[in-house]
Image: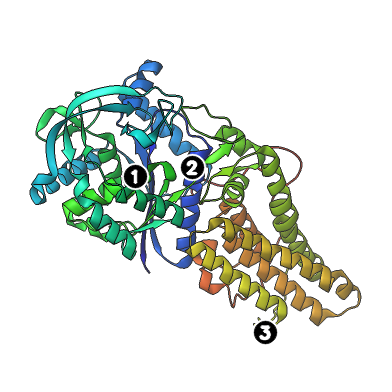
Amino acid sequence: MAKFYLTTAIDYSNGDPHLGHALEKVGADCIARYRRLRGDQVHFLMGMDEHSQSVIQAAERGGVTPREWVDRMTTTFADYWRRLLCSNDDWIRTTEPRHIRAVVALLERIQQRRADDLFVADYEGLYCTGCEEFKQGAQIVNGRCIEHPTLDLVATKERNHFFRLSAYGPRLLELIGSGAFRVEPAIRRNEVVRLIEAGLQDVSISRQRLPWGIPFPGDAEQTVYVWFDAVTNYLSATGFPDPRYERLWPADLHVIGKGITRFHCTLWPAMLLAAGIELPRQVWAHGYVHWEGAKMSKTAGVAVSVDTAIARHGADALRYFLLREVGFENDGNFTWERFDARYTADLADTLGNLVSRSLSMVDRYRQGVVPTDAVRADAPFERGARDTIAAYARAMDALALQEGAARIIELASRANRYVEETAPWKLAKAKRDAELDGVLAHLVRTVARLAVLSAPFVPAKAALMWTALGAPQALGDVHLEDLADLAVGGWHVSPPPPLFPKDGPGEGRSLMPEKA
């Protein structure tokens, strides 16, 4: 059983989450569930970024202390991800003692190993409180940050502690080029390579006299810069600096949004190189969710709330739509029309219809007991099913979640066509019992396979499908390798109510417990 340590970007505690956050979290959760399906020992981390000027400002607007504010926000975010069925194993907050200890230890380790990489200097520039970053020419359009065009840049002059990021460009290019440090998808890797080739600038890693943050070691007048603080969470969650941190480290995959690749693909690996710590194996930078052509963000205003989107057709349907329609590589659009269309065509009319008709026929013709029928790998329907499962696995291994979801619907569509071609009702009427047994066994086996394959995308509905099948083992105990020769004979099925009803908004709400 292989270790698989997976993380998401930790979210700013300065406002409620939006669909862009939801895309990242359900995408990472889909990957985590798939890796468990592969048989890996998954450790899935999520959490909150609680030290920043934006948090101070949000707390002031709310009339509370920063501590009260972040406590409120972490409850809000954790509840949203629970409702979206995220199966994270850990939840980290950058105000936790374990994290603060790790940040200090990392700085001290860099100081011991590469003392010249840390120095004090004056800095003057334009600061974006949305990004928590000093902005340079290419990052500014019409006097505003390209990521947060509604915020004013703040002219700032400070004397800070710096990290000599400029020294690490050649080594980072070598590691990215060799694949030792993978940056995916290719469009993001090319962007990072161009950024490094243009020359990395040394980075200020402290701020003067902020009332909320981690004190900089040895300098009570400074706090640790929020991005140096934040990215360290991936390491602090492993127990660093205790020796046992290596049971989880290195991270196998960081899932982030494309807007923060500069921190995760230049600053973060350079920090680890300076400290003599192994780099994460891969960073995946997904695109943005757009509404009417504009990026969804807190600063620009949330066009569609996560609450409203969940209420439309349920948590499972929202998860599926974000990963199938919006996608996990490039920017994608969210519209109610497309959400409703995908829900109806893919989930209700294809997947839900197959489950209902297949189990109903077993109930009608065989009193709910699945006939015993040998799996014939050379049978046309079975051969096609195995090819589709293999294509699903290739897509999911490559983090092509959009394609993985498409292969699920492809298999369900093929099975619906198989029903029409074999016409079980005609076989029953003609008393062709052996042929009918074979068709029913094929259909139940397909529904079982679909329950397993769809669990990373629609975990609550997959669990309901699996329960209706009456399988002797738990869904979580079935692995991808088990699907080829899955024996379903003797299972006692009970047709479920419609999995994806079309009675109107809100009727598809999930009844999944906190952890699927």
Label 1 to label 2: alpha-carbon separation: 29 Å
The residue mark sitting in front, 2 or 3, is 3
User: Secondary structure under badge 3?
Assistant: loop
Pick whichever, 349 or 342, lies toward us: 342
Find residue 187 and name its label.
Answer: none
Find residue 262 and name its label.
Answer: 1
Label 2 to label 3: alpha-carbon separation: 43 Å
Q: Determine which quarter of the picture holds residue 407.
A: bottom right
Q: Quadrant of the N terminus?
A: bottom left
- In-image side of 33 versus 458 (left or right): left
User: Secondary structure under badge 1?
Assistant: helix
Q: What residue is shown at x 48% (from left), y 40% (from top)?
A: 21
Spot occupied by residue 400 in the image (x, y as percentages of width and height):
52, 59
The vertical placement of 331 against 451, above or below, is above
Pick whichever, 342 or 483, lies toward us: 342
- In-image side of 124 versus 22 (left or right): left
Of the numbered discs 2 and 3, the one sitting upstream in the chain is 2
Spot occupied by residue 462 in the image (x, y as percentages of width and height):
60, 56
- The amino acid type found where label 1 is placed reads Arg
- The amino acid type found where label 2 is placed reads Arg
Spot occupied by residue 283 in the image (x, y as percentages of width and height):
38, 54
User: Secondary structure under badge 2?
Assistant: helix
Of the numbered discs 1 and 3, the one sitting upstream in the chain is 1
Find residue 82 and name its label.
Answer: 2
- In-image side of 492 versus 231 (left or right): right
